[in-house]
Amino acid sequence: MGKVRITALRKTTYPDLMARFENPIEHACEVREGQVWISENGERPEGMCPSAWDSMKPFAEALARGEGNFFDGWMKDPMSAMISCNDGFRPVSFYLEAVES
């Protein structure tokens, strides 16, 4: 299995939804735009948010196995994927790409 580079490209927040639905929390998402992790052999990189990893894990594992072309040509680079975490209040968009081992 190979390596997958994971880059946090965009992070946004929805203060109106947070005010309406979310209970205050002390440790919200600490991901920063531009932050990079390397997944080796389809494993969650150290420091990667476990919840975000759950959203991208199937894609990272497939890319690590050399598989790609998700959804028949969805991405310009077939060995990549754009995945968002499942936090509806402060979603982060992650770019996953297979890299040389």
Image (cartoon, rainbow, N blue to C red):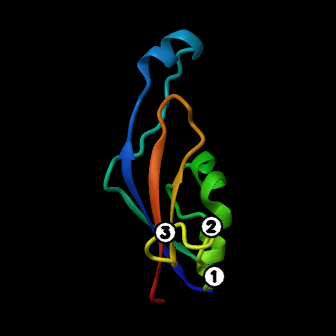
Residue 99 image point, x, y percent: 45, 82
Residue 9 in sight from this viewpoint: yes
Q: Is residue 64 depicted above or below 58 in this figure?
A: below
Q: Earlier in the sequence, mark 1 or mark 3?
A: 1
Is residue 43 something that shows in the picture?
Answer: no
Residue 61 against residue 66 in the figure, above or below: above
Residue position for label 1: 67
Which numbered disc, 1 or 2, marks the residue that appears first in the sequence? Answer: 2
Q: Which residue is mark 3?
A: 75
32 to the left or right of 18: left
Q: Are marks 1 and 3 in contact (CB under 8 Å)?
A: no
- Amino acid on which disc 3 is placed: Met
Helix, strand or loop under label 1: loop
Question: Which quadrant would residue 6 be assigned to in this image?
Answer: bottom left
Alpha-carbon distance for marks 3 and 2? 12 Å
Q: Is residue 69 above or below residue 66?
A: above
Q: Secondary structure at mark 2?
A: helix
Label 3: state its secondary structure. Answer: loop
Which label number is shown at residue 59? 2
Residue drawn at x 68%, y 65% as measured from the top left = 58
Residue 89: horizontal and vertical position, in percent?
51, 28
CB-based contact (under 8 Å), mark 1 and mark 2? no
Cα–Cα span, label 1 and label 2:
9 Å
